[in-house]
Image (cartoon, rainbow, N blue to C red):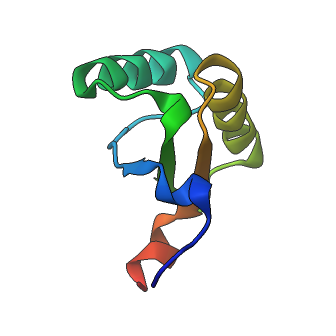
Amino acid sequence: SYNSDPFVMKTKSVLLNFVGDTNDGDLFEEFFEERLKQLAIDPKENLFFFCEEILTPKCNREKLTQILFEKFEVAAFYTRNTQAMALY
C-alpha cells in the first residue's frame, strides 16, 4: 500500500536480532550501538521494530523505550510479541 506521509517515505526500517534480557540496559546499549556502527545506520533517520516474548515485563519495555529515545534518539520504534507476529 502507498503511504503519503513524508516521514515514513524518507525513512528505512531496520531488523536486528538481540537475544537477551532488555532489562540489562548496558548489554542492550552495547549491542545496539555496535550494530548501528557496523551497518552505518543513523538511528535518527530509521524506524525500528522489536519482537519480544509474550511474558516480557512492562518494566523491560519501559527501559527499552528510555534507552532508544534518550540515548540513541531513534526516530520511531514499535514492539510486538513474537506470538502475535507469528500470525502474520
x 55%, y 31%: residue: 44
In the rendered structure, the answer to whether residue 15 lies left or right of residue 45 reads: left
Q: Is residue 13 above or below residue 88?
A: above
Q: On the rendered image, what quadrant is the C terminus found in?
A: bottom left
The x and y percentages for residue 4 are 57, 71
Kindly tell me whether residue 79 is visible in this rendering: no
Question: Which x, y percent locates residue 15?
Answer: 34, 49
Tally of numbered tags: 0
Q: Residue 1 occupies which quadrant of the picture?
A: bottom left
| Residue 82 position within the rendered picture, expressed as x and y whole percent measured from the top left | 46, 66
- Residue 52: x percent and y percent? 51, 54
In the image, residue 73 above or below residue 76: above
Residue in the image at 69% along x and 37% along y: 65
Q: Give me the residue at 36% from left, 24% from top.
A: 36
Residue 49 appears anywhere in the view: yes
On screen, 35 above or below 65? above
Left or right of 33? Residue 3 is: right
Residue name at image x 59 percent, y 48 percent: 77
Q: Which one is in front, 19 or 65?
A: 65
